[in-house]
Amino acid sequence: MTTTHSGRARNYLNAAYTLRSWLTTLDHKRIGILYLISITLFFFLGGAFAVLLRVELLTPRADLVQADTYNKLFTMHGMVMIFLFLIPSIPAVLGNFLIPLMIGARDLAFPRLNLLSWYVFIVGGVFLLLSVILGGVDTGWTFYTPYSSTYSNSHVALAAIGVFITGFSSILTGLNFIVTIHKMRAPGLTWFRLPLFVWAHYATSLIQVLGTPIIAITIVLVGLERIFGMGIFDPKLGGDPVLFQHLFWFYSHPAVYIMILPSMGVISELITCFSRKRVYGYRFIAFSSLAIAVFGFLVWGHHMFVSSQSAYAGMVFSVLSYLVAIPSAIKVFNWTATLYRGSVGFRTPMLYAFGFLGLFTIGGLTGLFLANMGLDVHLHDTYFVVAHFHYIMVGGAIMGYLGGMHFWWPKITGRMYPEALSKFAALVVFVGFNLTFFPQFLLGFEGMPRRYHVYDPGFQVLNVMSTAGASILGVGYLIPMGYFLWSLRYGPVATANPWGAKGLEWQTSSPPPTDNFERTPVVTEEAYTYPRSEVELA
């Protein structure tokens, strides 16, 4: 008995020591895994809210929840998914884990700041969760004033504090990446030898550092009006509600590119690896990432075509909104040119890359409809906008995230996953996504407004299709969760470079040692120097 008790005591001590070592780690790879665990939990919480929304919309009447609860459901779905999953997903997880490896560094420039960013993220997430537990928020994820600043009786303050705090996590991560990329590249790794994944994160970090303070200031102003009655946004107090929209969208449209640019970086890596060709137009893709970051700050007004904005300002923002599509189109055309006559391998990560290309292209093209002032008057605040947004954010950002997770999972864990099952999951996600959101384009074009839980019975068939698709999509997201966890114990051991990919991260073991490399690597060749395939030479 004594031996048994002492053995249990040793196990508890070992477990406590292991937990402490993780919670105090300065290793960028472990911090990336801490982010992975955190955002996965938030993803399924946000998904649970979406399930309740879609079940309610099966019928035209309020069968499951009443209007107030429905408002809280779509608000919390948006807040959790955007602030606690989409914004941090690729930068905080894959960026944290991979950027030092990709540039031949031992860690990020500021390891303690990196760990602090995770703790700040968790604290912000706790405040958002408290707002859910105590009854939720009903303002919409956009916090539109004066409702949020004066009239809402829900827990706006808690949610606003949560968003404010998580913004600092985003700023710290972006600052760390910028300094690391500038100062810690391996000998020979010039700017135009950097992986495009790093270029995408560099552009993203610029948006995080320059744009996030704007939303932080805006949230503070909402709080001042709500708590002290200062007349900032409420017309009754002498404020201007349109001012809030200018401030909010000046950050929130660039925030779209915080979510999608890292995914574009992932897709560049996948396409060049699985087509066995150097990416076509490397410099154009690199500079297009910076162009997207710049243009992202110039188009906020297209969210305000129906918000008392002058016709002249609307015309300017309309033109700029068309122009911002050009850098994205450059990427898509160059990825397609990379595939042309390449030796394309249809592995699971590549299936997600193909899914990204199709869904992101649809999302981008439908964005042009919303950039047109005349069409936007009809489509504004309808399900067309919901569908467009999700084709970019879910069809683009999450497809890229899943593609990256499947590509670098062997590097992160040292284990492989079942290839057949993972390909099936990719197919399920693609089919489920299109069945969920394509009917919403039709709903919006026919005039169904978003945020309504009671609707005309003529819209029911399309809503039933959308809910059925959401069920399939949910299964598609659960399958990878299952086989990733399975692979941690039972998956085949991965080699250092299971895909035959190029890049410094594949020149170290899987998973990498604490210091990443036994000796600092020296780069002597351009990025993605794959040997020309037989298909190319034919």
Image (cartoon, helix red, strand yellow):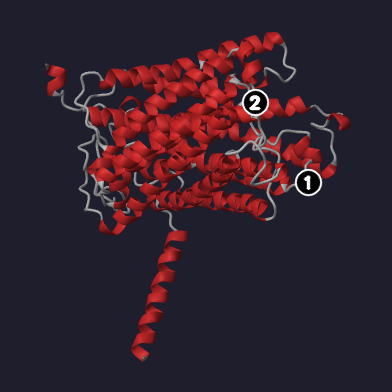
Q: What is the quadrant of residue 192 in the picture?
A: top left
Which residue is disc 2 drawn over?
A: 381
Could you tell me which quadrant the N terminus lies in? bottom left
Query: x, y percentage for residue 173?
Result: 50, 42
Q: Residue at x 44, y 65 (%)?
A: 19
Task: Classify residue 359 as left or right of residue 416.
Answer: right
In the rendered image, the vertical position of residue 243 relative to residue 369, given as above or below: below
> How far across and how far down the image is residue 106, in percent?
34, 46
Name the amino acid type tagged 2. Answer: Asp
Question: Residue type at mark 1?
Answer: Asn
Say what secondary structure mark 1 lies in: loop
Closer to us: 102 or 33: 33
Residue at 54% across, 53% down: 119
Q: Nearer the viewer, mark 1 or mark 2?
A: 2
Label drawn at residue 406: none
Quadrant of the rendering where the C terminus is positioned? top left
State the residue at coordinates (59%, 39%): 78
254 to the left or right of 532 = right
Q: Is residue 175 visible?
A: no
In the picture, measured across the screen, residue 79 lies left or right of residue 21, that is: right
Compare residues 67 and 72 and report the one nearer the observer: 67
Point 25% across, 43% down: residue: 420
**Of residues 151 and 56, which is closer to you in this image?**
56
Quarter of the view holding residue 232? top right
Task: Tell me the number on the disc at residue 153.
Answer: 1
Q: Is residue 287 among the parts visible in the rendering? A: yes
Rendering coords of residue 395 (x, y %): 44, 31
Disc 2 element = loop
- Number of other residues with Cα within 10 Å of mark 1, as a class: few under 14, some 14 to 19, many 20 or more: few
Tell me how far mark 1 sits from mark 2, CA to CA.
24 Å
